[in-house]
Amino acid sequence: MSTPDYFTAYENLAMTRDDDGVLLVRLHTDGAALTFTGQTHEDLPAALEDIALDRDNTAVVLTGTGDHFVKDIDGPSLGEIFKPAAWEKTRVEGAKVLQRLVELPVPVIGVANGPAVIHSEYLLLADIHIASEQATYGDFPHPAFGITGGDGVQVVWEEVVGTARAKWLLWTGETIDASAALAWGVVSEVVAHDRAVERGLEIARGLAAKPALYRSLQKQTLNRNLRRRILQDVPFGMALEGLTAADLPYQAQA
């Protein structure tokens, strides 16, 4: 099986594929834990489209590098999000990431290899979600930046844990640990830290062995409601988020 060009096309995505067609996608910055940037935000929807169109992929394992999934962000690299044209770029990219995650024609195994306090919804959108015992979950950037969490984090958390728990998590900026995530139904399993990625790969190989049509149609069947919520509610949420982003320069002058 040849190595596609897109495996090395994205600076924050390291991709390898085994003989079963299981694609391991690791978020990273220079080979270490990821610092989320505007480039990451731009590349993710394009990378997911490449993955979807490659019929040699039978399953995907999405994880981070080192000891966290995503806990650091470079805010200025996101650009002038307080300006409508810049925010529209962000809005389109953000919506496409969520849509493409739920529409990939293969199962996705999310592995939280540590704190997931930025874009935790990527993991929650996985078809099966495994957590390291060191994993934590929350929403750091929206409360920290003073902008509304409307980019899908609100939709996905509400669907997974219910309205009351989602509102508590997203209002307070608090985090939950892996054991609480298991109790809330956020994750399917909690495993030893050094076993998390390998456990994700084990599950992915089992699903990869199933018929291709089954994998594709099962994905559509089980993600129907999530896909509807994303299409219906994320545009409105991101419009409100854009309004609070537009207010940032005035807040700075106050």
Image (cartoon, rainbow, N blue to C red):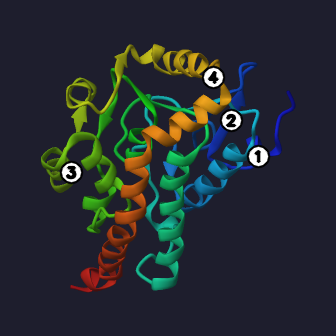
Q: Report the side of 130 relative to 10 (left or right).
A: left
Q: Amino acid at mark 1?
A: Tyr
**In the structure shown, which secondary structural element does the residue marked by tag 1 occupy?**
helix
Label 2–label 1 contact, CB within 8 A:
yes
- Relative depth, front residue between 200 and 136: 200
Which residue does the numbered mark 2 point to in the structure image? 15
C-alpha span from label 2 to label 3: 32 Å
The label shown at residue 85 is none
In this rendering, is residue 101 above or below 178? below
Name the residue carrying label 1. 6
Q: Residue 247 lies in what quarter of the image?
A: bottom left
Rendered residue at 71%/30% (across/down): 16
- Please name the residue that numbered disc 4 is placed on: 208
Q: CA distance from mark 2 to mark 1?
A: 9 Å
Task: Work out how far the residue at label 3 is from the one at label 4, CA to CA, in angstroms.
Answer: 37 Å
Mark 3 vs mark 1: in front = 1
Q: Are marks 3 and 4 in contact (CB under 8 Å)?
A: no
User: Residue at (71%, 19%) from the top-left corner?
Assistant: 20
Which numbered disc flags the more N-terminal residue, 4 or 1? 1
